[in-house]
Image (cartoon, helix red, strand yellow):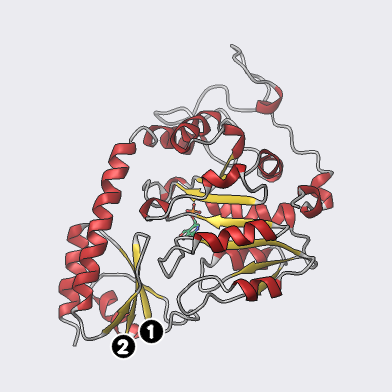
C-alpha cells in the first residue's frame, strides 16, 4: 500500500544532489588538493582543516552494532530536529500538503511545519494522553504526508500504546514518524525492530538525552533504505561536523556508563515522584517513561517563579492544552533533586 513515489515531492524525486569533494574521491591519498581546504592545518591542538565524512560511516557503523540496524537504514542529523525538518522538505509540498500532530507533544513538529509552510492538523490526545485513532482517521486526507507520534511523549512523559501506532502504520499511506528521543528511559521497546515490517515507518532517536551529548547535536533517523537515501539527498553535505563525529564515536564506546546513568535516573525519578506527592500544591503526577515528569499543581506560575528565585529552572507547561496547571520537571542528579525538594518545602 505504501509507495514512496506517491508521497515524495516531485522536485526531490528529480533532484541531483550536491556532489562534494569527499563524495567524488573516497579512499586514501597523500596529497588532497580537491576541496579548497587549508592545507597547513588548524590553529588548534586538534586538526579540523579537512571536511568531515558526509555520510558519517564510522559513527553509523558503531550505531549499527549497538542498535542492530544495518548502516543503510540509518540517517544522522544535526540533532533529530534536523531529521524532522528534512522529512518536511522531502515529502511535503509547501502550501499544498499537510501533516498530523497529536498535542500535547514536542513543539518542533509545529515549528518545522510553519517554517516549511505546511498545514498542520491537530488531533489532541485523549485525556489519558493516548491516540484518538478515530480523530486521526477523520483528519487524514489525500495531502496528508506525515503523522508525528512522540513516544515516550514530551511533555506528558507517557508511552503511546503500541497497538495504536501499529494500526496507523498498517493503514496510513504516508509516513508515520515515531519520535523515540526518550526511549532509553522507557519500559516499552523501540519501534526500530518493526522497520522490516512497515515500509512507512521512520523512527527518530537522539544522542541528546540518555547519551548526554545534547551539545554535539547528533540525532538519528532509522527507516527503509529508500527513505534514508532521500534524506541523505536533501541534507546539507557536511551536516555532522568532524568534532561531533569524533566525540560521538568515542562516547558510543561507553555504553556501560550510559546504562548506569539510566538506572540512576529511573531510581531518582521514582524518588522524586514520592517526595513531590507529599506537597499540598501537587495535584497529580503523570506516570512517566522518560527522564522528566509532568506535575499538575495548584499554582504553576507562582511555583515556577518561586523556584527561579532560588536558581532552579523547571519548564512551565501550564499554557499547553491538556497540561493545564502543569510543570515539567527534568530528573537531575540526586543532589539537584534534593535541592528542588528542599526548596519546595519553603514554598508557602
Ligand atoms: C521528543 C523530542 N524529539 C526531539 C528532540 C530534539 O532532539 P535533538 O537534540 O536530537 O535535536 C527533543 C528535544 O527536547 C524532544 O523532546
Look at mark 1 in the image and give the residue it sits on: 325
Q: Please, what secondary structure does the residue beneath circle 1 have? A: loop
Closer to us: 284 or 97? 284
Q: Position of residue 297 (x, y in %)?
A: 31, 83
Outermost top residue: 30
What residue is at 56 percent from the left and 64 percent from the top? 164
Image label count: 2
Residue 74 position by quadrant: top right
Relative vertical location of residue 63 with respect to residue 304 in this rendering, above or below: above
Please state, as top left, top right, bottom left or bottom right, where the C terminus lies in the image.
Answer: bottom left
Q: Badges 1 and 2: C-beta atoms under 8 Å apart?
A: yes
Look at mark 2 in the image and give the residue it sits on: 298
Q: For this view, does 313 lie left or right of residue 17?
A: left
Q: Position of residue 232 (x, y in %)?
A: 67, 40
Q: Please, what secondary structure does the residue beneath circle 2 have? A: loop
Q: Position of residue 192 (x, y in %)?
A: 53, 46
Q: Mark 2 Cα within 10 Å, few/some/many (few <14, many 20+)?
A: some
Relative vertical location of residue 297 with respect to residue 261 in this rendering, above or below: below
What residue is at 45 percent from the left and 45 percent from the top? 216
What residue is at 44 percent from the left and 69 percent from the top? 155
Amino acid at each position: 500500500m505504501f509507495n514512496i513515489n506517491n508521497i515524495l515531492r516531485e522536485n526531490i524525486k528529480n533532484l541531483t544532489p550536491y556532489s562534494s569533494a569527499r563524495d567524488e574521491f573516497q579512499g586514501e591519498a597523500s596529497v588532497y588538493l580537491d576541496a579548497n581546504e587549508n592545507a597547513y592545518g588548524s590553529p588548534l591542538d586538534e586538526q579540523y582543516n579537512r571536511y568531515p565524512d558526509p555520510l558519517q560511516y564510522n559513527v553509523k557503523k558503531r550505531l549499527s552494532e549497538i542498535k542492530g540496524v544495518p548502516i543503510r537504514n540509518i540517517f544522522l542529523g544535526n540533532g533529530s530536529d534536523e531529521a524532522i525538518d528534512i522529512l518536511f522538505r522531502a515529502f511535503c509540498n509547501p502550501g499544498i500538503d499537510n501533516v498530523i500532530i497529536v498535542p500535547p507533544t514536542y513543539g518542533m513538529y509545529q515549528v518545522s511545519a510553519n517554517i516549511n509552510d505546511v498545514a498542520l492538523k491537530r488531533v489532541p490526545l485523549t485525556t489519558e494522553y493516548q491516540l484518538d485513532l478515530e480523530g486521526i482517521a477523520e483528519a487524514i486526507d489525500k495531502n496528508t504526508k506525515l503523522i508525528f507520534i512522540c513516544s515516550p511523549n514530551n511533555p506528558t512523559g507517557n508511552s503511546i500504546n503500541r497497538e495504536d501506532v501499529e494500526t496507523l502504520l498498517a493503514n496510513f499511506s504516508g509516513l508515520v514518524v515515531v519520535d523515540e528521543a526518550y526511549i532509553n528511559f522507557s519500559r516499552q521497546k523501540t519501534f526500530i525492530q518493526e522497520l522490516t515490517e512497515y515500509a512507512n515507518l521512520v523512527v527518530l532517536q537522539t544522542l541528546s538525552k540518555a547519551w548526554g551529548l545534547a551539545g554535539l547535536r547528533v540525532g538519528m533517523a532509522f527507516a527503509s533504505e529508500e527513505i534514508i537515501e532521500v534524506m541523505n539527498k536533501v541534507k546539507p553535505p557536511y551536516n555532522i561536523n568532524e568534532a561531533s563525529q569524533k566525540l560521538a564515536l568515542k562516547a558510543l564506546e561507553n555504553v556501560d556508563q550510559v546504562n548506569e546513568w539510566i538506572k540512576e535516573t529511573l531510581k531518582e525519578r521514582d524518588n522524586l515522584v514520592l517526595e513531590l506527592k507529599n506537597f499540598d500544591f501537587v495535584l497529580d503526577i503523570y506516570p512517566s517513561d522518560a527522564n522528566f515528569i509532568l506535575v499538575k499543581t495548584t499554582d504553576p506560575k507562582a511555583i515556577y517563579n518561586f523556584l527561579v528565585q532560588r536558581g532552579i529552572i523547571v519548564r512551565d507547561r501550564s499554557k499547553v492544552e491538556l497540561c493545564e496547571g502543569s510543570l515539567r520537571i527534568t530528573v537531575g542528579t540526586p543532589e539537584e533533586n534534593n535541592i528542588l525538594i528542599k526548596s519546595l518545602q519553603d514554598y508557602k
